[in-house]
Amino acid sequence: MYQGLAAKAYDRIRQMIISGELKPGQKLIQENLAAELGVSRTPLLQAISRLSKDNLVVCIPRRGAYVRTLDEKTIIDVFDVRCALEPMGAALAASNITDKELEELRKVISEMEEAVSSNDSNAYIELDLAFHAKIMKSSRNQYIYDIIKGFSTTMLTRDMLLKSIEESLWEHKTIFNSLSRREAIAAKTAMEYHLNDNSRVKLRELLKSEAKVSIEG
């Protein structure tokens, strides 16, 4: 029972972080969250522990849990690592992906199309996370998978501010088509395009604008 309630609390708090309902640096008030989610202390603490392992929450002894805040350099550094590793992961996936995994990706693409049609950005972010995670898992390189998974949620929520979901969907379809043809170079190139240098420039501009708003606020 506790495991089911912990999973429910985890999913809801994670969505609150992704959607921006819970802001970076905001403290998680356990009493309020427990009441809102309808769970007791034990499953809530289990959920927070899992969120901490996902790098979405930081737990400070005797102070509590807070939504993780990343400084500009860390965000850019993570972005650079992602740009280096994900194309490699895509190339490896093209050589190792199974028919079953391709079918799973095809289903994610279909659900992405539905999210775009209904302009549901939150649903699209979740599907985006799943799409990238499945590709990295298909690479059969556990290190790449673990590293990318560690900060994928943080980066992908920002990706949604760098391009439209329509543009993102088109790029995901291009990656999928390369994988379905088992073309490693094409898959690598498509992923590189998806994580292009222009996005890095836009990310820097976004971080500067966020810092300005924070100071003025």
Image (spheres, rainbow, N blue to C red):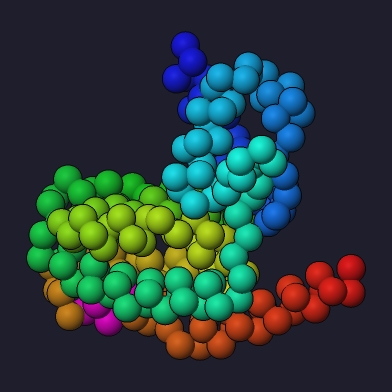
Q: Residue furthest right?
A: 217
Tell me what residue is drawn at x 54 percent, y 22 percent.
43
Q: Front-most of 214 and 155?
A: 214
Residue farthest to the front?
62
The quadrant in which residue 197 appears is bottom left
13 left or right of 183 in image: right
Please provide percent x and percent y for residue 143.
23, 60
Q: Position of residue 168 (x, y in %)?
A: 48, 69
Say above or below: 138 vs 217. above
Is the C terminus in the top left, top right, bottom left or bottom right quadrant? bottom right
Position of residue 69 in the picture relative to residue 184 (left or right): right
Q: Position of residue 157 (x, y in %)?
A: 57, 60
Q: Is residue 118 magenta?
A: no
Q: Which residues are magenta?
A: 186-191
Residue located 17% across and 45% down the image: 100
> From what the image shows, is residue 89 above or below residue 197?
above
Question: Is the magenta region chiefly helix, strand or loop?
Answer: helix
Give the number of marks: 0
| Residue 108 in sight here | yes
Whether residue 16 is visible to the viewer of this picture, yes or no, is no
Q: Nearer the viewer, residue 76 or 18?
A: 76
Determine which quarter of the picture holds residue 149: bottom left
Is residue 187 located in the magenta-colored stretch of the structure? Answer: yes
| Image position, residue 117 (x, y; %) | 56, 55
Q: Residue at x 75, y 75 (%)?
A: 211
Q: Is residue 8 above or below residue 167?
A: above
Q: Residue at x 45, y 71 (%)?
A: 78
